[in-house]
Image: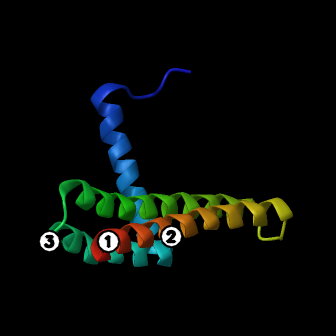
Amino acid sequence: MKPAHTGMTRIWKATFNSLRGIKTAWRYEAAFRQEALMCAALIPVALLADVSVAERLLLIISLFILVITELLNSAVEAVIDRIGAEFHELSGRAKDIASAAVFFALLLLIVTWISILFF
């Protein structure tokens, strides 16, 4: 099937879809809001820290990995919740695995920040 939009029109529409997704995550996902605010506080720290460019990038990348993972986790949860409110083992498993991905992203962030800023 041929896409409805191509070229710059597709990019333009995709950008607005992405911005709508960010707005929706901010509105409905407390964890996303917390992590976005954490990024707002920590990105200036990363920019002002006396570290190499590579280390600065690692600090910032670890923040983005956490946010990206949280967005994917929120998407999995929304799809599962759309299917139904009743408990199903596979639904629970999918939510738990997506949550575990966020947990590992957070661990990566903590290890990265501590390693760079304190060692």
Q: Quadrant of the C terminus?
A: bottom left
Residue occupied by mark 2: 107
C-beta proximity under 8 Å, tags 1 and 3? no
Farthest residue toward the top? 2
Q: Count neighbours of disc 3 (C-alpha within 10 A) and say few if under 14, some if 14 to 19, many if 20 or more.
A: few
Residue at the spot 31% in from the left edge and 32% down from the top edge: 9
Examine the image and state in which quarter residue 65 appears. bottom left
Tell which tag, 1 or 2, sits nearer the viewer: 2
Which of these two is toward me, 55 or 104? Answer: 55
Is disc 1 placed on a helix, strand or loop? helix
Where disc 3 sits, the SS reads helix
Residue corresponding to mark 1 = 39
Q: Position of residue 53 (x, y in %)?
A: 19, 55
Instruction: Work out how far the residue at label 1 is from the one at label 3, CA to CA, in angstroms.
Output: 14 Å
Residue that carries the numbered disc 3 in the rendered image? 48
Determine whether the residue tagged by mark 2 lies in a helix, strand or loop: helix
Q: Are marks 2 and 3 in contact (CB under 8 Å)?
A: no
Residue at the extreme front: 119
Residue at position x 37%, y 65% in the image: 63
